[in-house]
Image (cartoon, rainbow, N blue to C red):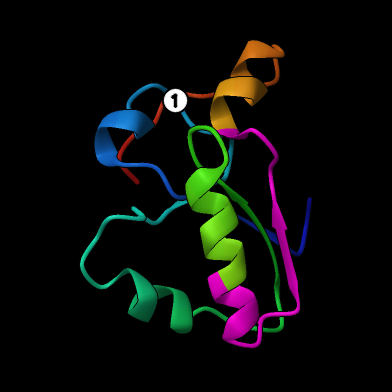
Amino acid sequence: RSGVVLIDLRTPDEVKKGIIKNATIIDYFRKDFEEVIAKLDPNKTYLLYCASGGRSGETLTLMKEKGFKNVYDLKNGFATWKAEGKPVQPYTGK
């Protein structure tokens, strides 16, 4: 969807299992995670996901605290997305 930024919060090992097309990878456990999030455009719309929903829920709260208005959490994360047969593609390192 145009105008929506898809953010994958999983670790590099998790990402090797595949990603949702056009996702931007921002590892939740990186040392500068909050700084990276703070540099995002607060006027854009974001859809967050992780493996099962925990990290994306916490990031949603963090982003709202930082003034982001349009932030959404993919409930139950990548595991459920993939289990439901929705499209997944290999991560190519971009």
Q: Nearer the viewer, residue 29 or 92?
A: 29
Nearest to the observer: residue 71 or residue 39: 71
Residue 59 to residue 25: above or below: below
Residue extending farthest bottom: 67
Number of marks drawn: 1
Q: Nearer the viewer, residue 19 or 83?
A: 83
Magenta stretch encompasses residue 32: no
Q: Position of residue 45 (x, y in %)?
A: 73, 68
Residue drawn at x 38%, y 21% as measured from the top left: 17
State the residue at coordinates (56%, 30%). 78
Going by the numbered disc 1, the residue's amino acid type is Gly
Mark 1 burial class by Cα count in 10 Å: few <14, some 14-19, many 20+: some
Residue 39 location, x and y as percent?
45, 83
* In the rendered image, the vertical position of residue 33 relative to residue 57, given as above or below: below
Residue at the extreme left of the image, as rendered: 31
The image quarter in which residue 43 lies: bottom right
x and y, in percent, of residue 63 in the image = 58, 75
In the image, 90: left or right of 20?
left
Q: Quadrant of residue 71?
A: bottom right
Tell me the element at label 1: loop
Residue 81 place in picture, x, y as percent? 66, 24
Residues rendered magenta in the picture:
62-77
**Can residue 2 be seen at all in this image of the molecule?**
yes
Left or right, 9 with reference to 77: left
Q: Which residue has dot 1 on it?
A: 18
Please say whether residue 7 is visible from this viewpoint: no
Residue 15 higher or lower than 10, as above or below: above
**Residue positioned 48% across, 50% down in the render:** 55
Q: Is residue 6 left or right of residue 70?
A: left
Q: Within the image, what quadrant is residue 53 found in? A: top right
**Residue at position x 70%, y 75% in the image:** 44
